[in-house]
Image (cartoon, rainbow, N blue to C red):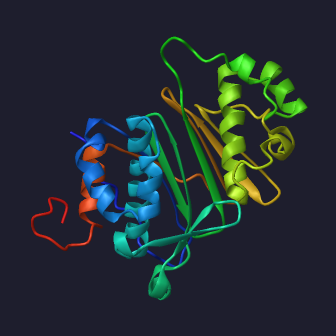
Amino acid sequence: MLPDVPEFPNIRPKTTTICVIWALGDAASEDLLRVVEKILDKPAIERSNRLFWKKDRVRFLCSHLLRRALLSRLTGVPMDEILFTTNRYGKPYLTLGGHEHSAGTWNFNVSSSADWVAFLATNNGQCGIDIERLPDTDPMPDLKEMSKANVFSGREKEYLMSGPGSFRLRFYQIWTLKEAYLKYTGRGLAGIEQIDMVDLFNLQQPMNEGQWASEKGDATAFHRFEEDYALSVVLKRDQAMPEVHVLHDEQVFELVKGTFPRKRKSDRYA
């Protein structure tokens, strides 16, 4: 039996950070998508419709559903009343209209890869997250060839070839850390080749049971290397890595039930 949906924290004066991963299953492609299209704004629906592959459209819509459902749970604002704005680099931010007095200030970030969607939120500074599915079937990507790309600095390339652990571990560590850090700064992937993870964080520090942490400047970075995915999180300095909640389709159904506006008795999620 799947565990219950975690009791995510409501707004409290103390600092709170949450990290949720949705392991997408078959249900994500049918029932939930009908609900998602009811609550997403028109630009998001139009963007999803431009995606050629159905699996990409499903992942896009599910990432937006998880974002709205969890922000609704955190802020107490109905899913269809949550609004977003973006900075000049395209990073989304939460705007709550007349709800600010009760909702507090939450920064968030979302990442997806294959059948994984990851969400991170904190009310203490900026945040960034990146998740990458680890391939387990042939053909395996040529990681060493990919490591020659211009997105890596000279020192990062040296670390990739000679750092601690396996090459596969080092590659996904740097790859996810770079994306998470750039999203933390709010600049997206602009200037990715100019960011040096070797300079920013202590990558030589060994992992402990698949987990790693380092801090420098104003940021703290965390990395997890699991059997199915690699995950990196960047938060404001001195924050601890939040517990990672892994949800399955049925649990997301329950989460949506508690946040979807009650407008029609005929709606199975109302």
Residue 195 position in % (x across, y down) = 82, 45
The answer to whether one can see residue 61 in this image is: yes
In screen coordinates, is 3 left or right of 86?
left
Q: Is residue 157 left or right of residue 34?
A: right
Residue, x 71% and y 65% (percent of image)?
88
Image quarter in which the N terminus is found: top left
Dividing the picture into quarters, in which one does residue 266 lie?
bottom left
Across the whole image, how many numbered discs are drawn on residues? 0
| Residue at the extreme left of the image, as rendered | 266
Residue furthest top in the image: 138
Residue 61 locus on image (x, y percent): 40, 50
For image coordinates 56% across by 76% down, the residue present is: 105
Depth check: give the residue in front, 13 or 20. 20
Image: 258 above or below 150? below
Measured as percent of width and height from the top left, residue 252 is found at: 30, 51
Q: Is residue 82 above or below residue 57?
A: below
The image quadrant where one finds the C terminus is bottom left
Looking at the image, which residue is at 70% across and 60% down?
89
Residue at the spot x=60%, y=49% of the render? 129
